[in-house]
Image (cartoon, helix red, strand yellow):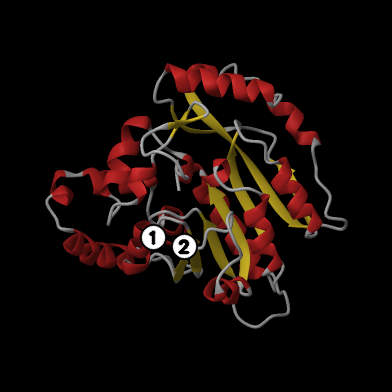
Amino acid sequence: MAESGSGDTGGVAGGKSRFDDIYDRPDPRTYFSRLAPLEYEIPHHAQPAFRQAAAERVALDDGIPGRPMVLDVCCSYGINAALLNHELTLAELYERYTSPDCQKLSTAQLAARDQEFYADRRRPDAVPVLGLDVAGPAVRYALQVGLLDAGFTDDLEQGPPGPGLRRALAEVGLITLTGGGSYISDRTFTALLDGARRPVWVSAFVLRTVSYHPIMRTLAAHGLHTTLEASRTYPQRLFTDERERQYAIATVRALGHDPAGREENGRFHSLHYESRPGAVGDIDHRNEQSQR
């Protein structure tokens, strides 16, 4: 999910624009058409990180039969699953879904073509992916075209997982997140990790306008050690307007980051956090200083 959550469609929450309406469509064409001018790019940056984390997690013998699954939180139309398991780039997806030929198709026609499109590009090392998002139409489309092995719309900010998600959580070995960090909290991660049977890793790209510390504390309480990639930040998208730019600059400063060369230049930026089982489930804050 790129930019969603509860609230007025197309409105602004705390100065940050919302795009709730693009997840209520029956297929992803509006998603890509709306986000293309804003150069939304975080799934592109996450692609190699998620592939590496998934490969390493699958290779880990955790003593439980079967392959561990990936759970993509705030999965929307299955974009991260598409990039994880198929020989594709985000640029190719933008080109596909914004093309004039694609606009002429009905949703049923597009879904039929997408089933073939993704099947033809499936990687031999593809891993099973589950999707979680409150946007039902987006999850249904990702399931229909074969991007997700199972999809769920449970709102874990409001209540516990239902029976289907509870069963699925027992097989999850890696949780991925891009873009949803603004709209979910430690409540969601508590519910996910409480239902885990396997050792769970987390790979998350989180906007610098959001404090990840409450979630890191929850991960630590479940035995996970979190590290921040210190070498860089990752551009997410252009700001929609000057109001959003000023909001981002003020917020990252309040969180102790320096917006110079990043938010001041007109884009949201994200940080990459990796969480894996640690000896005492501690939190590594040291690397964060390099982003301030």
Callout 2: SS = loop
Q: Earlier in the sequence, mark 2 or mark 1?
A: 1
Residue 71 is situated, as x and y percent measured from the top left of the image, at: 55, 63
The answer to whether residue 257 is left or right of residue 283 is left
Do the residues bearing badges 2 and 1 touch, measured as CB atoms within 8 Å?
A: yes
> Residue at the right extreme?
280
The numbered dot on residue 108 is none
Q: Is residue 250 left or right of residue 30?
A: right
**Can residue 225 be seen at all in this image of the molecule?**
no
Using the image, determine if residue 210 lies above or below residue 67.
above
Q: Residues within 10 Å of mark 1 (few under 14, many from 20)?
A: some
| Residue at the spot 11% in from the left edge and 51% down from the top edge | 104
On the image, which quarter does residue 144 sit in? bottom left
Q: Is residue 92 left or right of residue 210?
A: left
Where 229 sits versus 289, above or below? Answer: below
What residue is drawn where x is 36% and y is 62%?
142
Q: Dot 1 corresponds to which residue?
A: 136
Residue 153, which numbered label? 2
Residue 7 is drawn in which quadrant?
Answer: top left
Say which element carries label 1.
helix
Q: How many marks?
A: 2
Position of 2 relative to 84 (above/below): above
Residue at image location 51% in from the left, 29% down from the top: 268
Q: Is residue 244 visible?
A: yes
Mark 2 belongs to which amino acid?
Thr
Few, some or many residues within 10 Å of mark 2 (<14, 14–19, 20+): some
Amino acid type of disc 1? Gly
